[in-house]
Amino acid sequence: MYFCYSRPTDGGSSSSVASATLNGTSLTNVKDIFVADSVVNNGFHFGCRLAFDNDQHLFVTLGDRYKYMKEAQNTDNHFGKIVRIERNGDVPEDNPFVEGDAPEVFSYGHRNVQGLTVHPQTGEVWAMEHGPKGGDEVNLIKAGNNYGWPVITYGIDYNGSIISDKTKQEGMEQPVLYWDPSIAPSGMTFYASEVFKDWQGDLLVGALKFRHLRRISFNEAGEVESQTEYLRDRNERIRDVEVGPNGLIYLLTDESNGKLLQITPAN
C-alpha cells in the first residue's frame, strides 16, 4: 500500500509518500519513496492526494504551504505542484521537467489539491483544489501545464484583500469548473458502474464547508451540464468519495466521530 503523510524534519515538515505492507492491523516494510523539498515550519496546505494512472505512475499532490504561494510558479521546487513518480519513487524519463532541480514535477501553479482521480474511460488525470476565499477549482491535468496560482485566481484572500486582479493569462490553464463561494471540495471520483444507471460518467465530489455530496454531469462536449447536491440534511463534512466494486458509493466523513457511509439507490 501507499500513503502520504506530514513528515517532521529539521526546520519543519513536508509531505512524504511511503510504501508499506499491510499485515492485519499493522504495517511492515515501511519505506519513504518520495519526500517533498517544501520543508517549512507551518501546518498548512500539504496536499497529499495519491492516484495511479493506467501506466501505474503514481501522482502526488503537494500544496503551496500557504505563505509560500509564489513558489507555485517555480518548477524547480515542490511547492504547489503535482508530481509523477514510479511505484518505487524513481522519476519517469518522460516527465516534463526531468532536467530541472525538481524532476518529479508534472504540473504546477496549484494552491492545495484535495482531490485526485483518473477517469476510468479516458485515463485522464483530474484534480480538484481549494481556492482561497472563493475560487475552488476542478482541473484536467496535463504534463507541463501551468494552472495559474497565484498569478490568476477566481478567489480573494481571507481578509478580503486582492491576491490577483487576473482570472486569465496566456500560458495558464483555465479550470473545467470553479466555485465561488467555495464549497471546500475534498475527495473525487468518476462513476462508472451500473447501480446508479443515470450517473454514468458523472463526477462525484465531497464538500467540507458546504457539507454534502455533489454530482457533476457533463454534456457530450465535456462541458459541465448540471450539479446536484445530496445529503445536506446530514450536516457532515465529506472528506473522501469512492465507488466500490459493487457499484455502491462510499463516503468518509471528517468529524470527531467520523463515519464510513454506504450510499445505495433510493429505489
Image: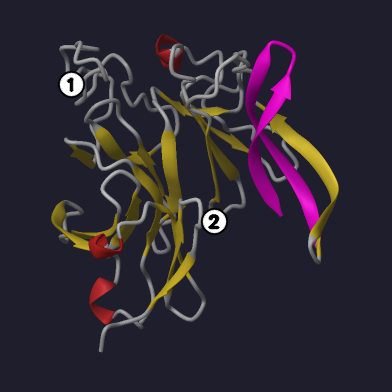
Looking at the rendering, which quadrant does residue 43 occupy? top right
| Residue 264 horizontal side relative to residue 90, left or right | left
Q: Badge 2: few (under 14), some or many (20 or more) residues near its Cα, within 10 Å?
A: some
**Residue 221 at x, y = what percent?**
16, 55
Which residue occupies 60% across, 46% down?
57
Chief secondary structure of the magenta portion? strand
Q: Which residue is mark 1?
A: 168
The amino acid sitting under disc 1 is Lys
Which residue occupies 51% across, 19% down?
79
The amino acid sitting under disc 2 is Asn
Q: Nearer the viewer, mark 2 or mark 1?
A: 1
Which residue occupies 24% across, 12% down?
163
Is residue 176 covered in magenta? no
Q: Which residue is mark 2?
A: 54
Q: Is residue 166 above or below residue 36?
A: above
| Residue positioned most to the front | 256
**Residue 19 at x, y = what percent?**
75, 46
Looking at the rendering, which quadrant does residue 213 occupy? bottom left
Which residues are the magenta region?
Answer: 1-22
Q: Is residue 107 above or below residue 199?
A: above
Q: Tell me the element at label 1.
A: loop
